[in-house]
Every structure is written in structure tokens, then in C-alpha cells.
Amino acid sequence: MSEDQFTKLFKYIEEFRSEVNEKFEQTASQESLDRLTNTIDSFVKRLDDSEIEQVSRDEQFKRLLNWARQVSKKTGIPLRDL
């Protein structure tokens, strides 16, 4: 193998190595993005669950307040701040 052929082969291998390294870096970046996306999805789900619980609790409180007003009327005992 002549020196010129060796130099060409060396350059080719270096370029190939650079391409492979670049692909590995992109893959690692994609994995990081996937982890980040999953984390965000998890937080959004927790927020959705929390909002659903809050709406349910608010409706339950409204029913309880309505019941307390009815009891107040029927018993003649006034309840303040209702």
C-alpha cells in the first residue's frame, strides 16, 4: 500500500468515524428529548387530575352549602355568611 493510498484510506476512516459519532450524538439528544417529553406529559396528567378533583370538590361544596341553607330555613336557625 502506497503512502497516498494509506492517506486516502485514513481520511475516509476519519470521515466515517465523524459521521458515526454525529449519529450517536443525535441519538443521545433524541433520547434526552424523549425523556423530557415524557416528564412533561406526566406533569400535564397530574395537573389534569388535580383540576378534575378540584371541580369535583367545588361541586360537592356547593351541594353541601345548599343543604345547609335548606336546613337553616327549616329549623329557623340562621347561619351567618351563607
Image (cartoon, rainbow, N blue to C red):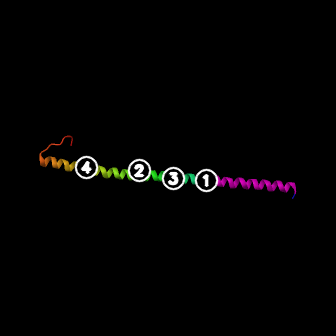
- Name the amino acid type tagged 1: Ala
**Residue where numbered disc 3 is placed:** 37
- Name the amino acid type tagged 3: Thr
Report x, y in % for residue 69: 18, 47
Are there few (<14), some (14-19), or many (20+) residues within 10 Å of tag 2? few
CB within 8 Å, label 2 to label 3: no
Q: Secondary structure at mark 4?
A: helix
Side of 50 where 4 appears, left or right: right
* Boundaries of the magenta span: 2-27
Task: Quadrant for the N terminus, please.
Answer: bottom right
Are there few (<14), some (14-19), or many (20+) residues within 10 Å of tag 3? few
Between marks 2 and 3, how big is the CA–CA gap?
Answer: 15 Å
Q: Compare residues 40 and 75 and report the one nearer the observer.
A: 75
Report x, y in % for residue 73: 14, 47
Residue at 53% x, 53% y is: 35
Between marks 4 and 1, how big is the CA–CA gap?
Answer: 51 Å
Q: Earlier in the sequence, mark 2 or mark 4?
A: 2
Q: Which mark is residue 62?
A: 4
Task: Quadrant for the C terminus, please.
Answer: top left
Q: Earlier in the sequence, mark 2 or mark 3?
A: 3
Q: Residue furthest right?
A: 2
